Image (spheres, helix red, strand yellow):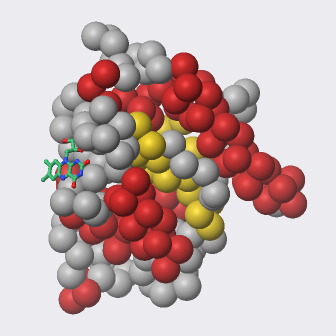
Amino acid sequence: MRVLAVSGSLRRDSHNTKLLRAAEELAPEGFEFELYEELESVPPYNEDRDGDEAPLGAAHLRARIADADALLIATPEYNSSVPGQLKNAVDWASRPVRAGALWGKPVVVIGASSGMYGAVWAQAELRKILATAGARVVDAEVAVSRAAERFDADGRLVDEEIRDELRAALDSLVAEVEPQLVAA
Ligand SMILES: Cc1cc2nc3c(=O)[nH]c(=O)nc-3n(C[C@H](O)[C@H](O)[C@H](O)COP(=O)(O)O)c2cc1C
């Protein structure tokens, strides 16, 4: 099962990217993890430039999503919502309507923030946006609050409760995807 992991943060030491690396470490047998690292090269959505000749960064994003069986997205919270670069990527992947790369794609949303609430508002908004784009949003949540305290100096997730939540979220993703893979 090929899982494309997308961090909504462009920051080098991003807690959200570390959370995805923890997910890779905890993933059940059979997971093939790929980290999408080109979010910054996706241009701002422009309907005039959309179509068969979409800009390279957008076309590449769409192809990577299309190739994956499922997505795992970790979002930070910026001003109580989804960071612009992540929303922009969802917009590209939501088109063409009903035929975009996100259409029918199983997705788990998780998130980390430096504050008290673990990016729960951003996660809720991202789920709403993804559902509008036709993705199959899996009912799972991992909300990492006070993220700076949850990773050690090597970037390893050291909070056992969150590690368990992450395992459960990945199990939910497998449960969503596997019947589909068996049928294929
Ligand atoms: C522009 C901006 C807005 C932010 N707004 C919020 C917010 O509304 N709520 C929150 O919990 N944290 C907020 N933060 C703090 C982020 O949660 C924190 O920087 C987090 O570590 C970002 O994720 P990252 O480590 O993956 O880059 C904001 C940070 C930035 C840069």
For the point 27% across and 68% down, which residue is it? 88
Q: State the image quarter where residue 37 is shown.
A: top left
Determine the residue located farthest toward the top in the rendered image: 153
Please name whichever residue, 20 or 152, is drawn nearer the observer in this view of the structure: 152
Q: Quadrant of residue 58?
A: bottom left
Residue 31 place in picture, x, y as percent: 65, 34
Tell me the residue at 48%/26% (across/down): 22
Whether residue 40 is situated above or below residue 1 in the rendered picture: below
Q: Nearer the viewer, residue 8 or 69?
A: 8
| Quarter of the figure that contains the N terminus | top right
**Drawn side of residue 78 relative to residue 179, left or right:** left
Q: Is residue 39 visible?
A: no
- The foreground one among 38 and 17 is 17
Does the image show residue 174? Answer: yes
Residue 116, given in percent of the width and then of the height, sits at: 31, 41
Q: Is residue 86 above or below residue 34?
A: below
Residue at left 53%, top 74%?
A: 131
Quadrant, the C terminus: bottom right
Q: Is residue 105 left or right of residue 118?
A: right
Residue 184 appears left or right of 106: right
Which quadrant of the view contains residue 165?
A: top right
Residue 121's place in the image compared with 31, above or below, is below
* Viewer-closest of 150 and 74: 150
Q: Residue furthest toward the front?
A: 116
Residue 55 point in image, percent of width and height: 25, 70
Q: Residue at x 63, y 32 (%)?
A: 167
Q: How many marks?
A: 0
